[in-house]
């Protein structure tokens, strides 16, 4: 009996590839070539399954060209690369990789916040450039984390992880804004107080963005929102590019209307707005918030579990459009 065909859109851990090879005829991409949408579509033709990452766009155009496709498993919790409505209409199951990355991503959000507020990257560059000739009282003086007000925009699992770290680890006063308010028990656990978006922007000393990207959250932090922030405030984005208007942020950093930013995600990444590369008061990392080896392995294995379960006629663990399964 021939095995169903699976396309790996990007490279993956060899052990995960080996697991998948027992269930699928796999076309791998261990060279990790980044394909254009047209190149991805061409390779997806005749495949029943795809293992994707957040940069691989699956929309109505791709689906129309690939009628054999039945499942796309994203190795990411975010799935704004999927047009879920189009996938549901085409009867293609979408899965993502939530939960396994929550604590690792919250760790990174906190690390980026600390590096930003305490000017770690900027001072390290200064030292490496041989510019450290004397100590001075205000050299790279930043802002405090402990006791400060931590604002969180988007209070899902990762936002809650950051809140717990801030409240319990650093004695921060945690405020948050979200589409819906957390239930009282969770609020108490996170020691977090629900506020309006305006109050969040005006009062946070450090603002961390953890909301999902959608048309509704596009430029949720634009010039008007940045203007509400304190001139001493820091902004951290570990959510998705496009949530922040990067051009407006570059200007705010240049004009010091906010103190600093830490960015792991960018509009149009891997390209970075040149204005952000020009200012010293920003820490830039290449979308690595979930990048610990155990977590990336767990994410890849969860995507593989979803593919293997689905193809074996079992319930996938983390379906995004379960309506497709009901029609099976
Ligand atoms: C996710 O899982 O969505 C992270 O951003 C990694 O892509």
Image: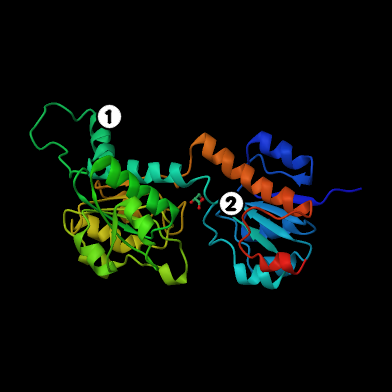
Ligand 1 lies under 8 Å from the Cβ of mark 2 = yes
Residue 47 seen in this snapshot: yes
**Label 1 crowding class (10 Å Cα cut-off): few <14, some 14-19, many 20+?**
few
Nearest the camera: 187 or 49?
A: 187
The residue tagged 2 is: 53
Direction front: furthest residue: 185
Q: Is residue 41 above or below residue 304?
A: below
The residue tagged 1 is: 128
Image coordinates for residue 61, horizontal then vertical, percent = 67, 69
Direction left: furthest residue: 137
SS for callout 1: helix
At a point 13% along the width and 36% down the height, the residue shown is: 139
Q: CA distance from mark 2 to mark 1?
A: 35 Å
At a point 22% along the width and 40% down the height, the residue shown is: 118
SS for callout 2: loop
Image coordinates for residue 38, horizontal then vertical, percent = 66, 61
**Label 2 crowding class (10 Å Cα cut-off): few <14, some 14-19, many 20+?**
many
Image coordinates for residue 166, horizontal then vertical, percent = 29, 46
Residue 105 left/right relative to 6: left
Q: Is residue 13 above or below residue 224?
A: above
At a point 44% along the width and 53% down the height, the residue shown is: 157
Quarter residue 185 falls in = bottom left
At a point 37% along the width and 65% down the height, the residue shown is: 181
Nearest the camera: 77 or 37?
A: 77
Nearest the camera: 76 or 248?
A: 76
Question: Which of marks 1 and 2 precedes in the sequence?
Answer: 2
């Amino acid at each position: 009996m021939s095995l169903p065909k699976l396309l790996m859109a990007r490279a993956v851990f060899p052990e995960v590839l080996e697991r998948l090879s027992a269930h699928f005829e796999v076309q791998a991409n261990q060279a990790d070539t980044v394909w254009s949408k047209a190149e991805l579509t061409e390779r997806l033709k005749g495949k029943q399954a795809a293992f994707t990452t957040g940069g691989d766009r699956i929309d109505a155009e791709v689906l129309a060209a690939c009628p054999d496709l039945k499942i796309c498993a994203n190795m990411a919790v975010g799935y704004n690369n999927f047009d879920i409505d189009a996938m549901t209409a085409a009867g293609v199951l979408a899965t993502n990789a939530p939960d396994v990355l929550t604590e690792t991503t919250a760790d990174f959000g906190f690390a980026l916040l600390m590096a930003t507020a305490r000017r770690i990257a900027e001072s390290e560059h200064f030292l490496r450039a041989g510019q450290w000739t004397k100590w001075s009282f205000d050299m790279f003086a930043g802002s405090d984390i402990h006791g400060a007000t931590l604002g969180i925009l988007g209070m899902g699992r990762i936002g809650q992880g950051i809140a717990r770290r801030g409240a319990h680890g650093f004695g921060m006063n945690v405020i948050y804004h979200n589409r819906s308010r957390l239930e009282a028990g969770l609020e108490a656990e996170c020691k977090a107080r629900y506020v309006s978006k305006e109050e969040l922007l005006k009062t946070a000393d450090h603002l961390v963005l953890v909301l999902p990207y959608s048309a509704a959250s596009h430029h949720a932090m634009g010039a008007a929102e940045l203007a509400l922030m304190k001139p001493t405030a820091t902004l951290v984005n570990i959510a998705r590019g496009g949530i922040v208007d990067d051009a407006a942020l570059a200007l705010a950093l240049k004009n010091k209307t906010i103190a600093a930013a830490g960015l792991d995600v960018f509009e149009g990444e891997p390209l970075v707005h040149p204005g952000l590369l020009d200012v010293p008061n920003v820490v830039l990392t290449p979308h690595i918030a979930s990048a610990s080896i155990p977590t990336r392995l767990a994410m890849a294995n969860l995507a593989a579990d979803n593919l293997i379960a689905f193809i074996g006629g079992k319930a996938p663990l983390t379906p995004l459009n379960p309506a497709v399964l009901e029609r099976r």
